[in-house]
Image (spheres, rainbow, N blue to C red):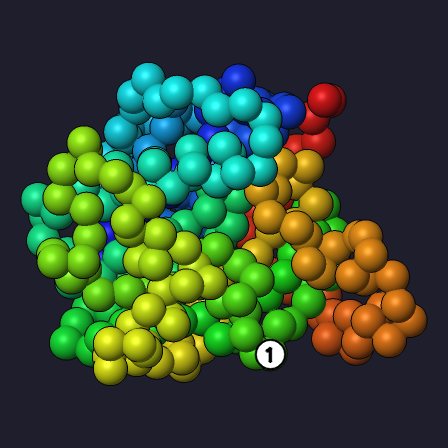
Amino acid sequence: MIAFVIPLRSKAMSKNWERVSQQCLRTIGSLLQQTASDYKIFLVCNEPPEGLRAEERVIVISRDFPIPENKPRRRHFDKLCKMCHGLVEARRLQPTHYMIVDADDCVSRRLAEFVKENSSAPGWYVDKGWIYHEHSRWIQWQRRNFHRVCGTSVIAPFDLERLPKRLDEDFNLYRPHVEHNRIVDTWTAVGKPLHPLPFAGAVYTLGTGENLSVETLGSGQRSSSWKRLIKSALWSRPLTSQLSVEFGLSEILSTTD
Protein backbone atom coordinates (compact mmCIF):
# COMPACT_ATOMS: atom_id res chain seq x y z
CA MET A 1 0.00 0.00 0.00
CA ILE A 2 1.16 3.53 -0.70
CA ALA A 3 0.51 6.44 1.66
CA PHE A 4 0.11 9.82 -0.02
CA VAL A 5 0.93 12.68 2.38
CA ILE A 6 -0.31 16.19 1.52
CA PRO A 7 1.00 19.07 3.68
CA LEU A 8 -1.37 22.04 3.30
CA ARG A 9 -0.47 25.57 4.26
CA SER A 10 -2.78 27.36 6.67
CA LYS A 11 -5.41 29.89 5.73
CA ALA A 12 -3.40 32.55 7.58
CA MET A 13 -0.38 31.82 5.35
CA SER A 14 -2.33 31.89 2.08
CA LYS A 15 -2.71 34.84 -0.25
CA ASN A 16 -6.01 33.50 -1.54
CA TRP A 17 -7.58 30.74 0.58
CA GLU A 18 -10.36 30.06 -1.91
CA ARG A 19 -7.81 29.37 -4.64
CA VAL A 20 -5.63 27.28 -2.31
CA SER A 21 -8.70 25.24 -1.38
CA GLN A 22 -9.64 24.65 -5.01
CA GLN A 23 -6.14 23.52 -5.88
CA CYS A 24 -5.99 21.17 -2.88
CA LEU A 25 -9.37 19.66 -3.80
CA ARG A 26 -8.08 19.08 -7.32
CA THR A 27 -4.97 17.35 -5.93
CA ILE A 28 -7.11 15.12 -3.73
CA GLY A 29 -9.39 14.37 -6.69
CA SER A 30 -6.33 13.42 -8.74
CA LEU A 31 -5.28 10.94 -6.05
CA LEU A 32 -8.76 9.52 -5.62
CA GLN A 33 -8.93 8.42 -9.26
CA GLN A 34 -6.22 5.77 -8.75
CA THR A 35 -6.87 2.56 -10.69
CA ALA A 36 -6.02 0.38 -7.66
CA SER A 37 -7.46 0.63 -4.15
CA ASP A 38 -4.24 0.03 -2.16
CA TYR A 39 -3.66 3.59 -0.97
CA LYS A 40 -4.57 6.16 1.67
CA ILE A 41 -4.35 9.93 1.57
CA PHE A 42 -3.16 11.83 4.64
CA LEU A 43 -4.05 15.53 4.48
CA VAL A 44 -2.16 17.45 7.16
CA CYS A 45 -3.41 20.97 7.82
CA ASN A 46 -4.41 23.69 10.25
CA GLU A 47 -7.84 23.76 8.65
CA PRO A 48 -9.26 21.60 5.82
CA PRO A 49 -9.79 23.23 2.43
CA GLU A 50 -13.20 24.76 1.80
CA GLY A 51 -15.57 22.29 0.18
CA LEU A 52 -13.77 19.12 1.29
CA ARG A 53 -16.15 16.18 1.43
CA ALA A 54 -15.74 13.14 3.64
CA GLU A 55 -13.94 10.34 1.78
CA GLU A 56 -13.05 6.92 3.13
CA ARG A 57 -9.55 7.08 1.70
CA VAL A 58 -8.79 10.60 2.91
CA ILE A 59 -7.57 10.92 6.51
CA VAL A 60 -7.58 14.55 7.64
CA ILE A 61 -5.04 15.47 10.31
CA SER A 62 -6.13 18.93 11.41
CA ARG A 63 -4.16 20.44 14.27
CA ASP A 64 -3.28 23.82 15.68
CA PHE A 65 0.13 24.01 14.03
CA PRO A 66 2.05 27.21 14.86
CA ILE A 67 1.64 29.88 12.19
CA PRO A 68 5.16 30.71 10.95
CA GLU A 69 6.28 34.19 10.00
CA ASN A 70 5.98 34.71 6.28
CA LYS A 71 9.60 33.88 5.58
CA PRO A 72 10.80 31.04 3.30
CA ARG A 73 12.70 29.12 6.00
CA ARG A 74 9.80 29.19 8.45
CA ARG A 75 7.35 28.24 5.70
CA HIS A 76 9.57 25.30 4.75
CA PHE A 77 9.71 24.17 8.37
CA ASP A 78 5.90 24.35 8.56
CA LYS A 79 5.77 22.03 5.55
CA LEU A 80 8.42 19.73 7.06
CA CYS A 81 6.48 19.47 10.31
CA LYS A 82 3.26 18.58 8.51
CA MET A 83 4.97 16.00 6.28
CA CYS A 84 6.39 14.26 9.35
CA HIS A 85 3.04 14.34 11.16
CA GLY A 86 1.50 12.63 8.16
CA LEU A 87 4.14 9.90 8.21
CA VAL A 88 3.64 9.30 11.95
CA GLU A 89 -0.08 8.79 11.33
CA ALA A 90 0.61 6.55 8.32
CA ARG A 91 2.78 4.15 10.36
CA ARG A 92 -0.23 2.41 11.90
CA LEU A 93 -1.40 1.26 8.46
CA GLN A 94 2.04 -0.20 7.62
CA PRO A 95 2.31 1.03 4.03
CA THR A 96 5.10 -0.31 1.85
CA HIS A 97 5.80 3.12 0.33
CA TYR A 98 4.97 6.78 0.78
CA MET A 99 4.85 9.81 -1.48
CA ILE A 100 4.83 13.45 -0.44
CA VAL A 101 2.36 15.34 -2.64
CA ASP A 102 2.30 19.12 -2.86
CA ALA A 103 -1.20 20.48 -2.38
CA ASP A 104 -1.37 22.02 -5.85
CA ASP A 105 0.12 19.22 -7.99
CA CYS A 106 -1.52 16.27 -9.74
CA VAL A 107 -0.38 12.66 -10.16
CA SER A 108 -0.87 9.82 -12.59
CA ARG A 109 -3.83 7.59 -11.86
CA ARG A 110 -1.52 4.56 -12.31
CA LEU A 111 0.72 5.09 -9.27
CA ALA A 112 -1.10 2.97 -6.69
CA GLU A 113 -1.48 0.08 -9.11
CA PHE A 114 2.19 0.24 -10.08
CA VAL A 115 3.29 0.22 -6.42
CA LYS A 116 0.96 -2.70 -5.67
CA GLU A 117 2.42 -4.74 -8.53
CA ASN A 118 6.00 -3.91 -7.47
CA SER A 119 5.65 -3.71 -3.69
CA SER A 120 9.02 -5.38 -3.03
CA ALA A 121 10.95 -2.77 -5.02
CA PRO A 122 12.88 -0.13 -3.05
CA GLY A 123 11.10 2.84 -4.63
CA TRP A 124 11.11 5.24 -7.56
CA TYR A 125 11.62 8.84 -8.52
CA VAL A 126 9.80 10.70 -11.27
CA ASP A 127 12.49 11.45 -13.83
CA LYS A 128 9.99 12.52 -16.51
CA GLY A 129 6.87 14.55 -15.90
CA TRP A 130 4.83 17.56 -16.93
CA ILE A 131 4.98 21.26 -16.05
CA TYR A 132 1.70 23.14 -16.12
CA HIS A 133 1.07 26.86 -15.73
CA GLU A 134 -2.33 27.48 -14.20
CA HIS A 135 -5.06 28.43 -16.71
CA SER A 136 -2.87 27.55 -19.71
CA ARG A 137 -4.04 25.46 -22.66
CA TRP A 138 -0.50 24.11 -22.97
CA ILE A 139 1.63 21.77 -20.89
CA GLN A 140 5.40 21.36 -20.97
CA TRP A 141 7.29 18.06 -21.07
CA GLN A 142 10.16 17.67 -18.60
CA ARG A 143 12.22 14.85 -20.05
CA ARG A 144 14.70 14.38 -17.20
CA ASN A 145 15.42 15.38 -13.60
CA PHE A 146 11.79 16.16 -12.86
CA HIS A 147 12.42 15.12 -9.25
CA ARG A 148 14.95 17.92 -8.87
CA VAL A 149 12.39 20.66 -9.49
CA CYS A 150 9.07 19.25 -8.24
CA GLY A 151 8.16 18.19 -4.70
CA THR A 152 5.65 15.62 -5.94
CA SER A 153 8.20 13.29 -7.41
CA VAL A 154 9.48 10.50 -5.13
CA ILE A 155 7.92 7.20 -4.05
CA ALA A 156 10.12 6.07 -1.18
CA PRO A 157 10.12 2.89 0.93
CA PHE A 158 8.33 3.20 4.26
CA ASP A 159 11.35 2.21 6.34
CA LEU A 160 10.20 2.14 9.97
CA GLU A 161 13.71 2.77 11.27
CA ARG A 162 14.32 5.85 9.15
CA LEU A 163 11.00 7.67 9.53
CA PRO A 164 9.56 9.59 12.51
CA LYS A 165 7.93 7.48 15.23
CA ARG A 166 6.45 10.11 17.55
CA LEU A 167 5.02 13.61 17.29
CA ASP A 168 7.48 14.99 19.86
CA GLU A 169 10.61 14.24 17.83
CA ASP A 170 12.93 16.76 16.20
CA PHE A 171 11.63 16.58 12.66
CA ASN A 172 14.78 18.23 11.29
CA LEU A 173 16.36 14.77 11.64
CA TYR A 174 14.11 13.49 8.85
CA ARG A 175 14.77 16.11 6.19
CA PRO A 176 16.78 13.63 4.07
CA HIS A 177 13.73 11.37 3.94
CA VAL A 178 11.00 13.89 3.15
CA GLU A 179 12.60 16.61 1.02
CA HIS A 180 12.29 15.64 -2.63
CA ASN A 181 15.71 16.92 -3.70
CA ARG A 182 17.42 14.81 -1.00
CA ILE A 183 15.50 11.52 -0.81
CA VAL A 184 17.07 9.96 -3.93
CA ASP A 185 20.60 10.84 -2.79
CA THR A 186 19.85 9.57 0.72
CA TRP A 187 18.92 6.08 -0.49
CA THR A 188 21.77 5.97 -3.00
CA ALA A 189 24.21 6.72 -0.17
CA VAL A 190 23.10 3.64 1.79
CA GLY A 191 23.34 1.34 -1.22
CA LYS A 192 19.60 1.12 -1.93
CA PRO A 193 19.12 3.38 -4.95
CA LEU A 194 15.63 4.27 -6.10
CA HIS A 195 14.75 3.67 -9.74
CA PRO A 196 13.29 6.08 -12.29
CA LEU A 197 9.54 5.61 -12.66
CA PRO A 198 8.93 4.09 -16.12
CA PHE A 199 6.19 6.60 -16.96
CA ALA A 200 5.38 10.25 -16.36
CA GLY A 201 4.19 10.29 -12.77
CA ALA A 202 3.14 13.83 -11.93
CA VAL A 203 2.24 17.33 -13.06
CA TYR A 204 4.10 20.21 -11.43
CA THR A 205 1.75 23.19 -11.29
CA LEU A 206 3.17 26.71 -11.50
CA GLY A 207 1.62 30.15 -11.63
CA THR A 208 -0.55 29.46 -8.59
CA GLY A 209 0.60 32.53 -6.71
CA GLU A 210 1.30 30.31 -3.70
CA ASN A 211 4.35 28.22 -4.71
CA LEU A 212 6.93 27.82 -1.93
CA SER A 213 9.91 27.12 -4.13
CA VAL A 214 11.30 29.19 -6.97
CA GLU A 215 9.25 28.59 -10.07
CA THR A 216 12.18 27.25 -12.03
CA LEU A 217 10.38 27.04 -15.31
CA GLY A 218 8.13 30.02 -14.75
CA SER A 219 8.71 33.73 -15.18
CA GLY A 220 11.82 35.36 -13.80
CA GLN A 221 15.55 35.39 -14.25
CA ARG A 222 15.97 31.69 -14.99
CA SER A 223 13.56 31.79 -17.91
CA SER A 224 14.66 35.11 -19.43
CA SER A 225 17.19 33.84 -21.95
CA TRP A 226 16.13 33.22 -25.53
CA LYS A 227 17.64 29.75 -25.36
CA ARG A 228 15.44 28.78 -22.43
CA LEU A 229 12.35 30.30 -24.01
CA ILE A 230 12.95 28.43 -27.26
CA LYS A 231 13.55 25.19 -25.39
CA SER A 232 10.35 25.73 -23.44
CA ALA A 233 8.40 26.25 -26.66
CA LEU A 234 9.87 23.13 -28.27
CA TRP A 235 8.82 20.93 -25.34
CA SER A 236 5.33 22.40 -24.95
CA ARG A 237 2.27 20.42 -26.02
CA PRO A 238 -1.46 21.14 -26.08
CA LEU A 239 -3.22 20.07 -22.89
CA THR A 240 -5.28 17.20 -24.27
CA SER A 241 -8.30 15.57 -22.67
CA GLN A 242 -6.24 12.37 -22.38
CA LEU A 243 -3.64 14.14 -20.22
CA SER A 244 -6.35 15.85 -18.19
CA VAL A 245 -7.95 12.49 -17.42
CA GLU A 246 -4.64 10.74 -16.71
CA PHE A 247 -3.70 13.30 -14.05
CA GLY A 248 -7.06 14.68 -12.94
CA LEU A 249 -5.92 18.09 -14.15
CA SER A 250 -9.14 20.07 -14.07
CA GLU A 251 -9.53 23.80 -14.59
CA ILE A 252 -9.33 26.01 -11.52
CA LEU A 253 -11.84 28.86 -11.57
CA SER A 254 -10.35 32.32 -11.38
CA THR A 255 -10.66 33.97 -7.98
CA THR A 256 -9.92 37.47 -6.78
CA ASP A 257 -6.95 38.07 -4.48
Picture quarter containing residue 160? Answer: bottom left
Q: Find numbered disc 1 in the image and state the secondary structure of the residue it sits on.
A: loop
In the displayed structure, would residue 3 be above or below residue 191?
A: above
Residue of label 1: 143
The image quadrant that residue 225 belongs to is bottom right
Q: Position of residue 207 (x, y in %)?
A: 70, 45
Q: Nearer the viewer, residue 221 or 97?
A: 221
Q: Position of residue 100 (x, y in %)?
A: 36, 52
| Near-viewer residue (67 or 106) | 67
Which residue is located at x 31 percent, y 58 percent? 177
Q: Is residue 2 above or below residue 63?
A: below
Residue drawn at (71%, 60%) of the image: 217
Residue 158: image location, x then y, percent: 18, 60
- Left/right of residue 147 with respect to residue 66 in the rendered view: right
Count of numbered circles in the view: 1
Is residue 199 visible from the viewing direction of this image?
yes
Residue at the right extreme of this rendering: 226
Q: Position of residue 185 (x, y in %)?
A: 38, 72
In the image, is residue 195 above or below residue 34? below
Q: Quadrant of the C terminus?
A: top right
Q: Quadrant of the N terminus?
A: bottom left
Question: Is 85 rendered above or below residue 18?
Answer: below
Is residue 99 visible in the rendered image? The answer is: no
**Closest to the observer: 229 or 31?**
229
Residue at x-position 53% and y-position 18%: 12
In the image, what residue occupies the spot 86% across and 76% down? 227
Q: Residues within 10 Å of mark 1 (few under 14, many from 20)?
A: few
Please tell me which residue lies in front, 80 or 100. Answer: 80
Mark 1 is on which residue type?
Answer: Arg
